[in-house]
Image (cartoon, rainbow, N blue to C red):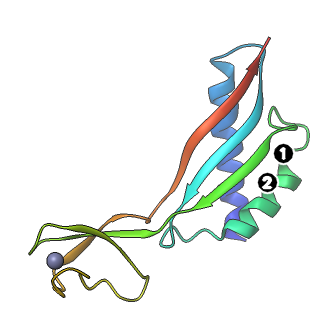
Amino acid sequence: MHELSICQALLEQLTTLSQQHPGGRIVGIHLHNGPLSGVESALLQHAFEIYKKGTLADQAVLTIENQPLRIHCRDCLGDSEASINDWTCPECASLATEVIGGDALILARLQLDIH
Ligand SMILES: [Zn+2]
């Protein structure tokens, strides 16, 4: 399962981050997941609950916020939300659009409890 390796990479990243704050305990993790990231939020959430045990994120609550796909239109220069299978600009119906958001899994926020 693809989400398992994502989860392990996430936990490694968290470990590195928390080492920069000795004594800190990870209490909350906030991720932004786009529809084109290739990551299934529910699967990642499930993998996290299993893999966090015994790590610095043992007590952490993972929140995954699904983000919309965002496109930029090269004709009218507008930015808008799009569906996964239709990247037509909703403003001018142009097909000259490019994805500017929703194609990645992003670690948006990390809450540390520092004593
Ligand atoms: Zn447009």
Q: Which SS class for mark 2? A: helix
Q: Is residue 100 left or right of residue 83?
A: left
Quarter occupied by the N terminus: bottom right
Check disc 1 and give the amino acid type: Lys
- Which quadrant of the structure image shows residue 40? bottom right
Q: Residue furthest front?
A: 91
Position of residue 96 relative to residue 12, above or below, is below
Q: Which percent across, then down, holds residue 87?
A: 31, 83
Q: Residues within 10 Å of mark 1 (few under 14, many from 20)?
A: some
Return the residue nearer the eye: 27 or 10.
Answer: 27
Tags 2 and 1 touching, CB below 8 Å: yes
Position of residue 38 relative to residue 32, above or below, is below
Q: Is residue 105 left or right of residue 82?
A: right
Q: Which SS class for mark 1? A: loop
- Residue at 80 percent across and 11 percent down: it is 115
Q: Which percent across, then down, holds residue 35?
A: 51, 72
Q: Calculate the distance from the C-alpha at mark 2 to the C-alpha at mark 1.
A: 6 Å
Mark 1, ligand 1, within 8 Å: the answer is no
Q: Label 2, on which residue?
A: 48
Q: Which percent across, then down, holds residue 45?
A: 76, 60
Return the residue nearer the eye: 69 or 49.
Answer: 69
- Which quadrant of the structure image shows residue 78? bottom left
Q: Residue furthest left?
A: 75
